[in-house]
Amino acid sequence: MEYKKPLPRPTGTDQEHWAGLKRHQVLVQRCDDCQTWLWYPRQMCSNCASFALSWTEVDPTGTIYSFTTQHHATGSKFDSDLPYSVAVVELDAAPEVKLVGPVNNVTPDGIHIGQRVRGTFLDATEDVTFLHFEPFDSETGS
């Protein structure tokens, strides 16, 4: 099935992030000098102004910091998804980093702040993979 929703246009700054997602890895920048985690991708550390930044793989598990549930589509290409929830997720491996993504496998009434989630990967096209989230199984915690 052809993916018909908008696709990102990676830049030189965030290309490594998108390449990692294609490999089903979440890559986040970290400053080599002060060890600060950085999100969104940038060329210079916002903490110490160093240009020595490295991409580091992190486990895509975390806690919902905030969320919203869309009941009205932002365009006709999203109509079939309604309602859907999008969360800001604070990563366990890099608490300074908060990633945004859709939350799957949960009803709008079943999502809440503080909920534990894990990352999943949606291969939208041959070149583009998106990070989504889903709740941990409440019975097993995995």
Image (tube, grey):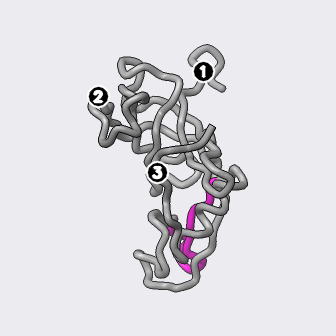
Could you tell whether 139 is left or right of 5 in the image?
right
* Residue that numbered label 1 is attached to: 137
Could you tell whether 117 is left or right of 74 in the image?
right
Could you tell whether 134 is left or right of 112 in the image?
right
**SS at mark 2 in the image:** loop
Tell me the CA gap for discs 2 and 1. 25 Å
Quadrant of residue 73 within the rendered picture: top left
- The amino acid beneath tag 2 is His
State the extent of the magenta-drawn residues as a range. Answer: 26-36
Tell me the CA gap for discs 3 and 1. 21 Å
Locate residue 24, reporting x and y percent. Answer: 69, 50
- The amino acid beneath tag 3 is Leu
- The amino acid beneath tag 1 is Asp
- Looking at the image, is mark 3 or mark 1 earlier in the sequence? 3
Vertical arrangement, residue 127 with respect to residue 42, above or below: above
For label 2, the crowd category at 10 Å Cα-Cα, with few meaning under 14, some 14 to 19 and many 20 or more, is few
* Dots 2, 1 in contact, CB < 8 A: no
Locate residue 65, reporting x and y percent. Answer: 38, 41
Q: Is residue 32 magenta?
A: yes
- Looking at the image, is mark 3 or mark 2 earlier in the sequence? 2
Q: Is residue 74 magenta?
A: no
- Looking at the image, is mark 2 or mark 1 earlier in the sequence? 2
**SS at mark 1 in the image:** loop
* Residue that numbered label 2 is attached to: 71
| In front: label 3 or label 2 | 2
- Quarter the N terminus occupies: top right
- Residue 99: mark: 3
